[in-house]
Amino acid sequence: MEDLEVEELKKYKFEIGPIRPPSEGGSHSLLIRVTCNCPWSKCKFCYGTPYGREKFRKRGLEEIIKDIQSIKNIEDVIKRLAARFGSMDWVSHIIDPLFLYGKFFDELDDTEYKNIQSIINVYNWMCSGEKTVFLQDANSLVMSSKDLVTILKYIKKHFPQVERITSYARSSTLSRKSLNDLIMLKNAGLDRLHVGLESGDDDVLKYVNKGATADDHIIGGKKAKKAKIELSEYIMPGLGGKKLSRQHAENTARVINEINPDYVRSRPYTPNPLTPLYEEMINGEFELLTPHEYLKELKILVKNLNFEGRLCFDHMMNFWMKKDGKPLFSRNYEGYKFPDEKGRVLSLIDEGLSIDESVHEHKLEYLA
């Protein structure tokens, strides 16, 4: 017998991009795609590969509003099903391609796959308390502030239980936004921005074709902080290779100190075979640091850090290990509070340097 609520659930879908920050709840954060792909896609270490090098596109306001309405519809149907079956656990048995379509995942057509993907994202978000929303993709602030405010208000209206709305942003875009626009976005509900700082050294930034300068990072970061938007900056140990290692560390610390972000998240450079920097490494133009050299560079950076935020190693790309096989640094999203735990981080770095390099190399090879 046909179940009307299950059939209704199959009607809805919305756009979901490929990546999101792990600290935003991973699969438990509601994902709303406001732009598609990366507007730059020229960084030598990334080259837009997370987005399949697809062309950047701003999504239309009506398109996005329609997606948010689809999310609301999915949420409503799941609530009705949970009430009927007595729990969310029972609903999980419905969210299965075999149950909904009589097919395995790899047999679904594009519409069916997007439907299942959408339902799963909303279901996971509901199970986690419906606290966080992440606006995809790589640089949502490239949208007009007026349209972004409309989207934020629409989200808050339909999902008043949401505690945090966050997004990626490029420093070059953030630095050009007016302070009034950022305050307006904050007041509309934008709580946190994730920014790929990568390096605070202009030579490194130019070499990897980041499309931003140290001044862009500082101006954009300070502006976000002044607007009272929480700021999470990503740094990339090893990005300067052997040649620029020291200045990369020292100037990255300088820029962080100037900005004073809420979070600094370490993402050590890991070679990606689909990028220009990997080709330069293969050709000998770029010399990858050894695991101990990464730690020595990190030690210079940490010694020079003088900010009041948290330093986080919340990703497996921080490949260093202890003798017992556990990660050298905590992978907790809140990381280490500075300046209080600066000494602890330096002690951990020294511990990593005391361990045979082969222990770290094994993990680095696995990531590459």
Image: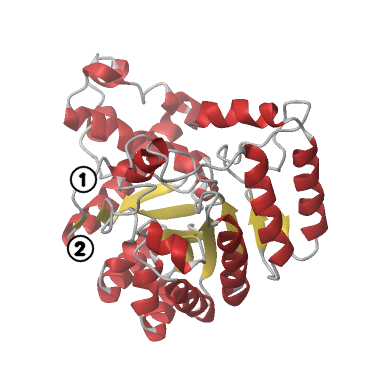
- Mark 1 vs mark 2: give the one in front: 1
- The residue at which mark 2 appears reads as 61
| Vertical arrangement, residue 113 with respect to residue 284, above or below | above
Residue 201 visible in this rendered orientation of the protein: yes
- The picture quadrant where one finds residue 256 is bottom right
Characterize the local packing of mark 2: few (<14), some (14-19) or many (20 or more) Cα atoms within 10 angstroms: some
Query: Circle 1 sits in a helix, a strand or a loop, which is it?
Result: loop
Q: How many marks?
A: 2
Check the image and report above or below for 356 versus 53.
above
Residue 164 located left or right of residue 110: right
Amino acid on which disc 2 is placed: Leu
Dot 1 and dot 2 residues touching (CB under 8 Å): no
Residue sitting nearer the eye, 313 or 226:
313
Sequence-earlier tag: 1 or 2 = 1
Across and down, in percent, residue 315 comes to 57, 41
Q: Which residue is mark 1?
A: 54
Q: Is residue 221 placed above or below 161 in the rendered structure? A: below
Instruction: Decide if residue 123 is on the left or right side of residue 116.
Output: right
Three-letter code, disc 1? Glu
**Residue 314: numbered disc:** none
Structural crowding at the residue carrying mark 1, measured as other residues with C-alpha within 10 Å and reported as few (<14), some (14–19) or many (≥20): some
- The answer to whether residue 76 is seen in the rendering is no
Q: Position of residue 129 (x, y in %)?
A: 53, 46
The residue sitting at 77% across, 59% down in the picture is 342
Of residue 14 and residue 179, the one placed in the foreground of this image is 179
Residue that appears at 24% across and 14% down: 102
Label 1 vs label 2: CA separation? 21 Å
The image shows residue 4 at horizontal and vertical percentages of: 24, 29
Name the secondary structure under disc 2. helix
